[in-house]
Image (cartoon, grey):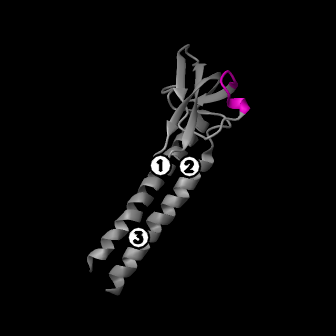
Amino acid sequence: MRPEWLFSLVPLTAGAGFLGFGLSGRRRAEALRRTGVTARGRIVRHDVTRSDEGATYRHPVATWTTQDGRECTHASRFGRDTIAPRFAVGASVVIRYDPAKPRRFLIQDWDTPAVDKVFTVLGTVLTAGTVAVVLVLLVTL
């Protein structure tokens, strides 16, 4: 086999990373759906991040009180380029959190499962496609 097959490691690595990210997010969302607790919270600010390409993402930071009385303030793991008025600073939101680890939470209607699904599908396609190509190359040599 010639060394060109090493280039297949690029989509395989990217696919495995996307797949891992997507499955992790889906597992987290499913656990919150099953065992999470709902609380009323509010948006206190937006953390702003910039990508390497210059895009700006705003992550709403929500604060809420857990059932056992702890105050929690955390930023959403999802950022968007624009903020809808219902997620503006001071807006009341519904939070679903893990009572054992309140840092694991989601903001209802903001944290969408579609992102995790896209990463899972893309990761599966890249990983399976690359493995199939490498297997065909191995068999035809």
Type of the residue with mark 3: Val
Type of the residue with mark 2: Asp
Disc 3 crowd, CA 10 A, few/some/many (<14, 14-19, 20+):
some
Which badge, 2 or 3, is on the more N-terminal residue? 2
Image location (x, y in percent) of residue 126: 47, 65
Q: Which residue is mark 2?
A: 116
- Secondary element type, mark 3: helix
Determine contact: label 2, label 3, CB under 8 Å: no
Separation of marks 2 and 1 at Cα, in angstroms: 7 Å
Separation of marks 2 and 3 at Cα, in angstroms: 22 Å
Snapshot quadrant of residue 95: top right
Disc 2 crowd, CA 10 A, few/some/many (<14, 14-19, 20+):
many
Image location (x, y in percent) of residue 21: 47, 49
Image location (x, y in percent) of residue 78: 56, 39
Q: Residue 21's mark?
A: 1
- As drawn, the residue found furthest toward the top would be 69
Separation of marks 1 and 3 at Cα, in angstroms: 19 Å
